[in-house]
Image (tube, grey):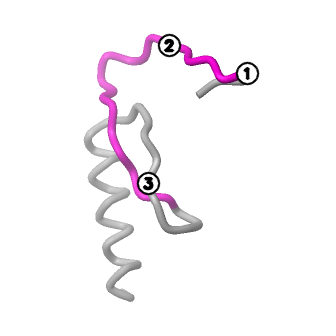
């Protein structure tokens, strides 16, 4: 969502996909453009935190 309640479509790197990532500082998720490798790393990191490792 952009300012003034409008949406914007922005071209992105061909290696990026639309992914849902866990938030770092609070519970929840965020939708963003990212690589699959970074998505997997962030999910693995969040699982470690959730398990108390």
Locate residue 14: give its quadrant. top left
**Which x, y percent locates residue 21?**
39, 50
Q: Residue furthest front?
A: 5
Q: CA distance from mark 2 to mark 1?
A: 17 Å
Q: Which residues are magenta?
A: 4-23
Residue 8 shown in magenta: yes
**Element type at mark 1:** helix
Q: CA distance from mark 1 to mark 3?
A: 23 Å
Q: Quadrant of the C terminus?
A: bottom left
Mark sitting earlier along the chain (2/3): 2
Which residue corresponds to mark 3? 29
Q: Residue at x 27, y 44 (%)?
A: 37
**Element type at mark 3:** strand
Mark 2 vs 1: CB contact within 8 A: no
Give the number of the mark in front: 2 or 1. Answer: 1
Does residue 6 appear to the left or right of 52 in the view shown? Answer: right
**Which x, y percent locates residue 20?**
35, 45
Residue 1 drawn above or below residue 29: above
Residue 27 drawn above or below residue 12: below
């Amino acid at each position: 969502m952009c300012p003034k309640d409008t949406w914007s479509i922005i071209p992105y790197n061909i290696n990026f996909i639309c992914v849902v990532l866990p938030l770092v500082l609070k519970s929840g998720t965020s939708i963003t453009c990212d690589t699959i490798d970074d998505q997997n790393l962030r999910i693995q990191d969040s699982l470690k935190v959730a398990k108390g490792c």
